[in-house]
Amino acid sequence: MSRGSRRNLLLGIGAGTLALGGGTALGAGFRGSSSTGTLLRSQAPLPEAFARPLTVPPVLEPVSSTATEDVYEITQKVAQAEILAGARTEIWGYEGLMPGPTLNTVRGRKVSVLHRNELPVPAVVHLHGAHAAPEHDGYPTDLVLPVGADDHGHFGNQHGEGADISHGERLYEYDNNERAGTYWYHDHRMDFTAPAVWKGLAGLHLISDDEERALPLPDGDRDVPLMLMDRAFAADGSLSYPSVDPSLLETHGVEHPYEAGVLGDVVLVNGTPWPFLDVADVRYRFRILNASNARRYRLRLDPAPEGVPEPFVQIGSDGGLLATPLTHPHLDLASAERQEVVIDFSGYRVGEAVKLLNDFGEGSTERIMEFRIVRTERDESSVPDVLSEIEPLDPAEATVERDMVFGSQAIDGHHGWTINGEAFAVDDVHAAPHQGAVEIWNLYGDFHHPVHLHLVHFQVLNRGTKGPRRFDHGWKDTIDLRPAEQARIITRFDGNPGKYVFHCHNLEHEDMMMMGNFEVV
Ligand code: C2O
Ligand code: CU
Ligand code: CU
């Protein structure tokens, strides 16, 4: 069925159908719960916690470099990983890895990545947080067909009119002029982003610059990414996922009762279940990314260092460094959000073990990983009082104010998710901001909806009648919108003209149509 007819069927179906009809799925996902979604239980025995060391994804070397540019090549392929001890798990990986290799880049040096698709399905690559030109942003229908697949008709109805189809490979080019920070690349194919990321298609893209490198923050081995993904495993060790169409080619969406989001019962950090990390009694910088489809986390150290009730010193968020550090007793992260924090392990004794727990988890997902303080080292790092400069956008400058309502709705008699009552359609434009214009968007949600805008970073002005929340500071590209909440954000649309998407980053919601277009004109 085409997008257009899908959308027509929406007419006359009232909002709220899903919430009422969803029964256990949404009941469990909403009331008193901290994630919107339903737990998918592993059939395989759960791996032992804190049994294997944390690994850090390898840094990808450029295949060539000039004075101003680095060129990379990534092959997307099916591979086997040992995620559960002694079992082989088939994954889809960038370079065959889950998570993919890290791109360690320098601000202002152009980055080009040639992606080759050796997967059995089309691919789309999006660099999350990038200020990319539209043809390099990974628009969901701009498919990269598998190598050797010359007949794209075989891949169903996923590409709209005007889709920019590539055969076998595609060169994605980035100015790479974003603020220094933690960005990530992941699959973004129309209708099938959630299962593709679940299978492993996600990796980090770090950007550094002189301003950041001049700061005395922990670095080298003491600058560690932590990519959180919850997953579930079948009895044979393969990844479970409740797709309606396991070929991931024709019919989108997940089986009932998982429409609200798929939550796994095993937490992977950089691809290893509940790992441990040996640390010295010094400061470390952690770049934490919630790369989970639907799960939210509230991270806490157990025990907290004595006399330090707020052990997380947040230095960065989605769009790089904060203006000044903020201390927190815990860290909340919705899907796609990043937080950079410094933890000072000098408050512990050598020989102690500290757990990173998840207060939003249940049972097995209450734990994340363990830090073991195993040695004493000198520490010359510190967290300066001023990290960066962030100029607040002035609401008086805003020329347009728009409302975007993120809600549940029946589509074709199935559960679906919409923005302003509309399912995603390639040709529908929700907003056409003028290039350079400052706009205020009022976001409204019924359940948890981590709302993400491509192209721009934004600032949070307020949440309902209150100011920004604890984790709303700095430049954001994803906001953790909670049930029945309203948030007001402000941004400047200073990108290249063209069409971009914004969507809910609960990836099941995204695949089930909670996405819209904005077109910079
Ligand atoms: Cu990370 Cu369009 O998303
Ligand atoms: Cu994005
Ligand atoms: Cu959502």
Image (cartoon, helix red, strand yellow):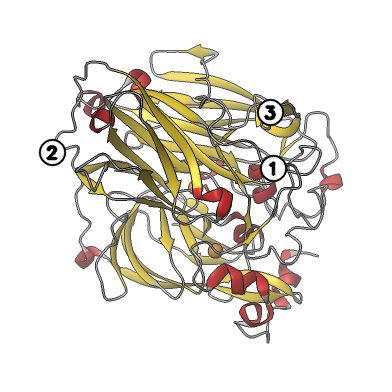
Indicate the amino acid at tag 1.
Answer: Leu
Q: Residues within 10 Å of mark 1 (few under 14, many from 20)?
A: many
Q: Earlier in the sequence, mark 2 or mark 1?
A: 1
341 lies left or right of 47: left
Please state the horizontal and vertical placement of residue 227, each as a whole percent of the image.
Answer: 49, 37
- Name the foreground residue: 468 vs 357: 357
SS label for mark 1: loop
Q: Is residue 361 above or below residue 135?
A: below
Label disc, if present, on residue 143 of the rendered structure? 1
Q: Is residue 256 above or below residue 301?
A: below
Point out the tag, 2 or 3, that comes first from the N-terminus. Answer: 3
Q: Residue at x 62, y 24 (%)?
A: 74
The answer to whether the beta carbon of the residue marked 1 is less than 8 Å from any atom of ligand 1 is: no
The residue beneath circle 3 is: 85
Kind of residue at badge 2: Asp
Residue 110 image position (x, y, % from top left): 42, 25
Identify which residue, 331 or 441, lies in the foreground.
331
Position of residue 200 in the picture relative to residue 247 (left or right)? left
